[in-house]
């Protein structure tokens, strides 16, 4: 299983069962799709299970990661989805809607206006509201308005009154004169309603409901009550959008198990356009950590200061003002407080997800080492140490050892070795030297012994290591080999006197862990070898220069790091670190002469 697949699997397992929006990302970390959900866990998981149509299958094949934003309601998630689509314009949101544009609600610019849903925007033909994220949202909104606002419903004007007039959903312009002023009032009411600026519709419906109830017309009163519920649901302004255009940053933080998560919502033109998530290991009082964070956020990270910064209760506004030169607000009620609470809620969920993933990762790695132990018929290898050699035709031979504890890298136990007793490219003798040095020291200093030793190689490497351990050091530690295929990928686990192949499922956690170990020890050895070659090359060139002894050579290597950087330096750069002026001139002349000869 690829690393990204493991990451996605863990993130899917800890998704909250809350409404919100999800953002799918590709290998370049670009957002390729934005969606909404009334239950994030169920919706996002559905992408990675079952069959899909061709376009969705293409989308899923490109997903390498995802993130999510929790909202309070499904309506909020719908509106946030639209905001995020308009900001990021993800290409799969375009592909998955069959190349159609997004729907709008339109009030036509006619003598007797109509209200309908359209995907085409034509200038000077009417008033448009939207766009809506999908046709369903637009149609449901229009249906509700049709029941409340009596716009003309027919496309072609009839010559007699229709059913809509008789049920109060049309003014009957086909028979009666309707003043333009009345239409303008209707247009203004709809405009304010769709922009979330007016509650007149709700108030009028409440009056009508009360009148119907007093007249004992309970069926009609119930209909008005249901209408009020639908209208309030639609008008419930998402907390992701504010009523004014003030530029705001909303901060919320949460603390758990020695970590702090800070969420920042960026509100621009009334919309949540972006979010910043930061995880911080907590070394001080949480409030002090937050004060430091917000100061660095604007001063060091150079985020643009907004008109207002909103923070959660309990923080000292004066302290924040001392590091952030803008208006600091601590909302106590209303939508602004709800936005801060939502930022805190997202921080809470992010932290709990982090720890749940760590917990699952631990169980995964523990399971992996248990599988390895069972397959090899040895006790569970809690501590695994792996070795790899690196050289080019026997030059600058080095070796490296890495350590995995409980299935995870223990980098404090990594070790590098320069080969001292072997001349030429002899992999077996190099391995014997390093194993001998490593475990002689382990015994001398009473360090913990590994439960399993892995060598990058086959039977020959395994035998030489076993010989050193048993015959020289009296240690009985299982030794396994990792064999690679023609593509230099981990292929087989070898164990026993005859280096038998241990059968492992290539998709198992055990095999995945062995791949990680082999890749990591190889990376560590190669990196050390490159560093050694660079230093050796530089040292050999410096050795030819009179007046450069071991101390000055070390001084030059430490400061400049490479021959190229020394040659590019000026005389004063060398004298600045204590090299005499004459010696500095000689160094530059000699190195440049060597370069000319090589070319």
Image (cartoon, rainbow, N blue to C red):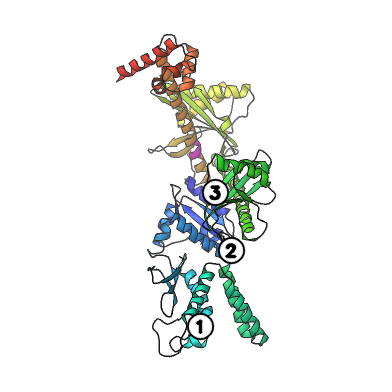
Mark 1 to mark 3: distance in Å?
A: 47 Å
Task: Give the mark nearest the N terminus, 1 or 3.
Answer: 1
Q: Nearer the viewer, residue 25 or 260?
A: 260
Task: Give the mark nearest the N terminus, 3 or 2.
Answer: 2
Q: Nearer the viewer, residue 57 or 558?
A: 558
Q: Residue furthest bottom?
A: 160
For the point 63% across and 78% down, the residue is 206
Task: Give the mark nearest the N terminus, 2 or 1.
Answer: 2
Mark 3 to mark 2: distance in Å?
A: 21 Å
- Magenta-colored span: 514-518
Badge 3 density bin: few <14, some 14–19, many ≥20, Cα 10 Å = few
Q: Which residue is mark 3?
A: 276
For the point 58% across and 67% down, the residue is 236
Number of numbered callouts drawn: 3
Mark 2 to mark 1: distance in Å?
A: 30 Å
Q: Which residue is mark 2?
A: 73
Task: Give residue 383's position: percent from left, percent from top.
Answer: 59, 35
């Amino acid at each position: 299983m690829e690393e990204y697949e493991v990451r996605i699997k863990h993130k899917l397992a800890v998704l909250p069962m809350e409404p919100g929006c999800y953002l799918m990302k590709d290998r370049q970390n670009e957002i390729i799709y934005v969606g909404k959900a009334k239950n994030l866990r169920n919706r996002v998981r559905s992408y990675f299970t079952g069959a899909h149509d061709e376009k969705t299958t293409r989308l899923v094949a490109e997903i390498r990661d995802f993130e999510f934003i929790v909202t309070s309601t499904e309506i909020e998630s719908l509106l946030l989805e639209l905001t995020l689509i308009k900001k990021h314009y993800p290409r799969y949101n375009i592909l998955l809607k069959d190349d159609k544009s997004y729907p709008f609600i339109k009030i036509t610019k006619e003598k007797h206006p109509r209200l309908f849903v359209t995907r085409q925007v034509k200038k000077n033909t009417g008033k448009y509201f939207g766009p809506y994220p999908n046709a369903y949202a637009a149609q449901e909104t229009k249906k509700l308005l049709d029941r409340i606002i009596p716009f003309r419903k027919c496309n072609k004007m009839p010559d007699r009154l229709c059913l809509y007039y008789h049920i109060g959903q049309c003014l009957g312009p086909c028979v009666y004169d309707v003043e333009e002023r009345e239409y303008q009032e209707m247009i203004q009411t709809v405009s304010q309603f769709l922009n979330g600026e007016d509650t007149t519709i709700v108030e009028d419906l409440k009056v009508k409901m009360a009148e119907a109830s007093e007249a004992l017309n309970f069926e009609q009163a119930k209909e008005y009550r249901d209408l009020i519920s639908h209208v309030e649901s639609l008008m419930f302004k998402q907390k992701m959008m504010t009523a004014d255009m003030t530029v705001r940053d909303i901060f919320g933080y949460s603390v758990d198990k020695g970590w702090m998560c800070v969420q920042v919502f960026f509100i621009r033109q009334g919309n949540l356009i972006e979010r910043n998530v930061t995880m911080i290991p907590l070394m001080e009082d949480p409030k002090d950590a937050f004060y430091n964070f917000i100061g660095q956020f604007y001063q060091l990270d150079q985020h643009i200061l907004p008109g207002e910064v909103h923070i959660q209760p309990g923080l000292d506004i004066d302290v924040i003002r001392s590091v952030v030169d803008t208006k600091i607000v601590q909302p106590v009620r209303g939508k602004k407080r709800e936005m801060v609470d939502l930022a805190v809620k997202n921080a809470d969920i992010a932290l709990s997800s982090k720890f749940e993933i760590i917990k699952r990762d631990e169980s995964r790695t523990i399971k992996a080492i248990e599988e390895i132990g069972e397959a090899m018929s040895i006790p569970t290898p809690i501590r695994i140490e792996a070795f790899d050699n690196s050289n080019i035709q026997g030059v600058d031979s080095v070796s490296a050892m890495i350590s995995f504890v409980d299935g995870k890298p223990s980098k404090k136990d990594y070790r590098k070795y320069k080969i001292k007793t072997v001349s030429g490219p002899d992999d077996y003798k190099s391995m014997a030297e390093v194993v001998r040095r490593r475990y002689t020291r382990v015994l001398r200093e009473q360090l913990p012994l590994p439960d399993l030793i892995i060598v990058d190689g086959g039977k020959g490497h395994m035998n030489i290591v076993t010989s050193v351990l048993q015959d020289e050091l009296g240690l009985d530690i299982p030794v396994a080999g990792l064999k690679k295929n023609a593509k230099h990928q981990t292929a087989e686990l070898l164990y026993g006197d005859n280096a038998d192949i241990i059968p492992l499922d290539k998709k198992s956690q055990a095999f995945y862990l062995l791949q990680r170990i082999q890749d990591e020890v190889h990376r560590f050895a190669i990196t050390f070898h490159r560093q050694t070659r660079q230093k050796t090359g530089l040292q050999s060139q410096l050795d030819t220069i009179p007046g450069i002894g071991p101390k000055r050579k070390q001084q030059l290597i430490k400061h400049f790091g490479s021959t190229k950087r020394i040659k590019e330096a000026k005389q004063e750069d060398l004298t600045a670190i204590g090299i005499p002026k004459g010696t500095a001139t000689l160094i530059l002349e000699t190195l440049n002469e060597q370069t000319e000869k090589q070319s």
